[in-house]
Amino acid sequence: MEIAPDNPAVLTNLAIAYLHNGNRKESIHQLQLTIQHQPDFANAHFHLANIYFSQNDFELAEKHYRNAITLQARNIAYLLKLGICLTSQEKFSEAEHHLVAALKLEPHNIEALYTLGYIYMGRGETASAVNHLRQAKKLTPNDPKILCTLAQALTYLPELEGSLKLFETVLKSHPYHPNAMEGKATVLHRLGRDKECYAILRSLIDNNALSPSSAQTYSQICNKFGDCRESKSLLKKMVADKTLHRQQTLTAHFALGHLYDREQNYESAFFHIEKANQLLNYRYDIDGDRQLVEDLIGTFSEEAFAELPRSTNPSAKPIFIVGMPRSGTTLLEQIISCHPGVHAGGEMTHIESYINKLRVSDSYPKGCPTLNSDIIEGLAKHYLSVITRLTSRNTRVTDKMPANFRHIPFIHLAFPKAAIIHCTRNPYDTCLSNFFQHFSSSYPWSTRLEDIEQYYILYRKCMKHWSEVLKIPMLSVCYEDLVANQRQVTADVLNFLGLKWNDSCLKFYRSKRAVATASVDQVKEPMYSRSVGRWIHYKPHLERLGLSEDHQ
C-alpha cells in the first residue's frame, strides 16, 4: 500500500489478510474503501459479499454478489455463491437460474450439483434432486453432506432401504454424525422399526444433540415408549429458542401442534400449527390459479373436447388416483396395491412434466384445440415406457399424484381405457388436514385456511366440469364411506378396475411397501375413524370459511 495505495488488488488482499487475522470489522472497512476507489473491481464486491454471507446478512451479500456478476458475468465462483445465497433466502427460482449457469460453464461443479439437488428436493421435484445429488456423489463418493442429502431425497421416491444404506455408510466413518443419526431414525420409523428408531433418538437426547426434525419424529413415537411429557418439554424449548433458524422453529411448531392435537388440546394445537404456517409464509398466486382453471374449462368445453384427437393406445395399465391432498389418496392406493395385480407407483410427476413442456411452447391449455395426435400419442408412449419399467408387463400401476385432477381431460385423451378414481372427503376435514400438514413450496396454498379454501373451490370446479360436462368416466370414492365400510368400498373399487376380489386388500396395514407421503402412519395400522369429523374440534377457526354443499 505504501507503493500503490489505490491499487484495488492490494487493498482487497489486505482486507483478506485482516479477515484471516480475525479482524472482520477492518476487513469490511478496507473492502468498502476499495469499492469507493474502484467500483468496478469485481473481486472486492465478491469478498465483501462473502463476509456478509458469513454473518447471515443475506440481503447485503446478495447485493454485492450481484454487483460482482454484473462486472464478470461468466465467473463460476460468483454465480455459485449468488446461487447459494439466494437458496439461503429460499429464492429458489432465481438461485436455480444462476446455479444452472454455473453448471453450463463447469458441468462437474460439485457445489452447484449439490445445491440444485437441495433446491429440487425442497420443491418436491424428487427425481431431479436425486439425479443431481447422484452426480455429486460420483465426484465425491464419501462426502457426508452429499450422502445424507441424497439419502433424504431417496425417502421421497420412496427408496427407504437405499436411503438407510446411505445413512449407515456415513455412520461407519462418522459414528456420531448428527444428520446421519437423525436420518436413520426417521427412515427406521417409516419402516415401522420404532424400537431401533427410539434407541437412536434417546442417544441424541442424552447427548443434547436432538434437532427439531428428530424431535418431530420422537413426538410421533413417544407414546409407544411411555408418556410424551419429555417430548413436549423439548419442543417447547425449541420454539422459544431464538438461536434456531426459521425452518427449525417451524418444524418444532408443527410437531408440537400435532402432539397437542393427539392430546385433544385443540386450542394449543391450532396455535402452534398456525405459527408454523406463518413462518412458512408461502406466496400463493390465487389469481394465477383462477386464470388457469378458467383456461382449462374454457379450452376443454364439451364441443372442443369432442373434436380433440384420442390416442389409439389400448392400454389400461395406468390407474390414476386424483383429488385434494389429504383426501384418502394414499390410503386407497395402499389398499389397491395389496392386490397381486397392482403395483403402487406413488406420486408420479411424469404427467405434470410432460405438460410443463407444452406450457413452454404456449400450447397448454389454450393451444390444446390445435394439438395433433402425435402429441397425444407421445404422452401415452412416454408414460407407458416409464411405468412398464416399474413392474411386470401384466401388472397395473397406480399414479396417485393428487394434482393430476387438473389434467384429467388430457389424461383421458392419452389413455381412453385407463381407470380414473376420484377421492373425496368432507371439505372442512380436507382443508383442516392440509393446514396441519408441513408441505413443500410446491403447495403454496397450504399455509392459510383462506387460501386452502380457494384452492379447494377451484379443485371442485374442475372436477364438476370433467364429470358433469365432459362426462369422463371415473369412480368417486368417499373417504368417510371407505372408513365406515372398507370391504364394500374396496369391492366396488376392484370391480371398477376389473380385478377379482383379494383378501389381502383388507390387510393393507401389513404391506411392506414404503410410503413417501404424510399419510405413512395411517396406512401402517388397521382402518380407524378418528379423522372423520375432526374439523368439529376446530370449528371456531373454520367457521369463517365459506364452504357449502356445492363444494362437497
Image (cartoon, rainbow, N blue to C red):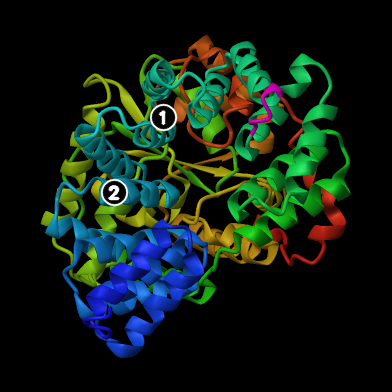
Whole-angstrom CA distance, mark 2 to mark 1, is 25 Å
Percent from the top left, x then y, of residue 542? 79, 59
Percent from the top left, x then y, of residue 226? 81, 16
Along the viewing direction, whichever of 388 and 439 lies nearer the viewer: 439
Percent from the top left, x then y, of residue 105? 13, 59
The residue carrying mark 1 is 158
Q: Which mark is residue 111?
A: 2
Magenta region, main secondary structure: loop
> Which one is in front in this view, the residue at disc 2 or the one at disc 1?
2
Q: Quadrant of the C terminus?
A: bottom right
Along the viewing direction, whichever of 460 and 162 lies nearer the viewer: 162
Tell me which amino acid carries mark 2. Answer: Glu
Q: Please give the range of residues in magenta.
A: 206-210
Please give left or right for residue 193 compared with residue 322 in the image: right
| On screen, residue 79 above or below 354 | below
Judge the density around disc 1: few (<14), some (14-19), many (≥20) Cα neighbours within 10 Å. Answer: many
Residue 483 appears in which quarter of the rendering? Answer: top right
Q: Quadrant of the N terminus?
A: bottom left
